[in-house]
Amino acid sequence: MARARIGRRLAVAGLAVTGLAALLSGASARAELIHRYSFDGAEVKDSVGKVNGTLKGDAKLADGKLVLENTDKMSGDAKLSYVQFDAPIAPKQGSVSIVAWVTAKQSPAFARVLDIGDVEGGEGRAFLYVMTRHEEDDKSRAAITASTVAERAFVTGEPLDDNKPHVAAVIVDGAAKTLGLYVDGKAAQPAEALGDNTLDKVRQTHAWLGRSGFDSDPGLTGSIDELRVYDHALTEAEAKAITDAGPDKLPEKPAPTTAPTTAPATGQ
């Protein structure tokens, strides 16, 4: 009897270990590239997932790039050139990393590389964005908010609108509850605390390239070589490896490293 009980306990323990291993394996398998846009061909096609995009205005694909010409055009302009994705490209909750290879011409501040969110009365709400340059500090900026711009969390990096190629990666880390920005594989500042501005509170009514949720912001003039969306928070090593590999090649998985240090929330 004693031996039978011990055998049963060992069997239960074995099942528990197997279940845990499967759970961890499943979690690892889910941490992957979920959307990829290389802008080849005549349409904006997702080569990894199933969310394609639509060219708006005079937006075009040429030489493997998305080309946008929006000189003197604001985001509310009916003739604006941009890409509108057919469905949300970010996960509904948790973490996301979005990487863009962009060459932007100098334009008025606030031009968006990427804008995901909602619009009320011509102003962005509950959004996640990457802009080429903000007028407050002449730096690029990534921001996320659960409501309005006043409650946003944001991080800054080197400006993107110098007509030179750059790689911008915005990272929402749901586990660490931080927002990070890498420009050309480097973090210009520590990751910022999200506070209440978590990914599940972003209203993914639209997902745009080259257009802002604020009608008075300028449209993007420049080109985007590639856009990738990952369903996990990239580490510094991963961001650098992606940058070094370039837009046409997926890098080998680098050795794990520590993500940017979390800074106290600023309330901005």
Image: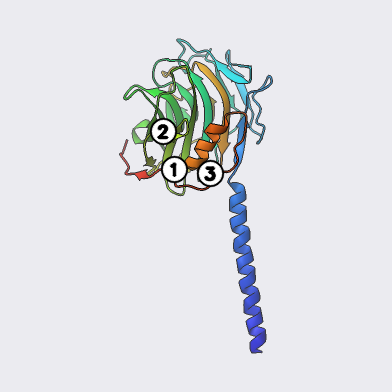
The residue under the point 40% across, 24% down is: 159
Residue 146 location in percent, x, y? 42, 38
The residue under the point 61% across, 73% down is: 13
| Nearest the eye: 247 or 179 | 247
Say above or below: 142 vs 6. Answer: above
Mark 2 neighbour density, 10 Å: few (under 14) some (14–19) many (20 or more): many
* Helix, strand or loop at mark 2: strand
The residue beneath circle 1 is 198
Mark 1 neighbour density, 10 Å: few (under 14) some (14–19) many (20 or more): many
The residue beneath circle 2 is 143
Q: Earlier in the sequence, mark 1 or mark 3?
A: 1
The residue beneath circle 3 is 232
- Horizontal placement of 5 versus 151: left or right? right
Q: Amino acid at mark 1?
A: Thr
Q: Earlier in the sequence, mark 2 or mark 1?
A: 2
- From where the camera sits, is residue 121 visible? no
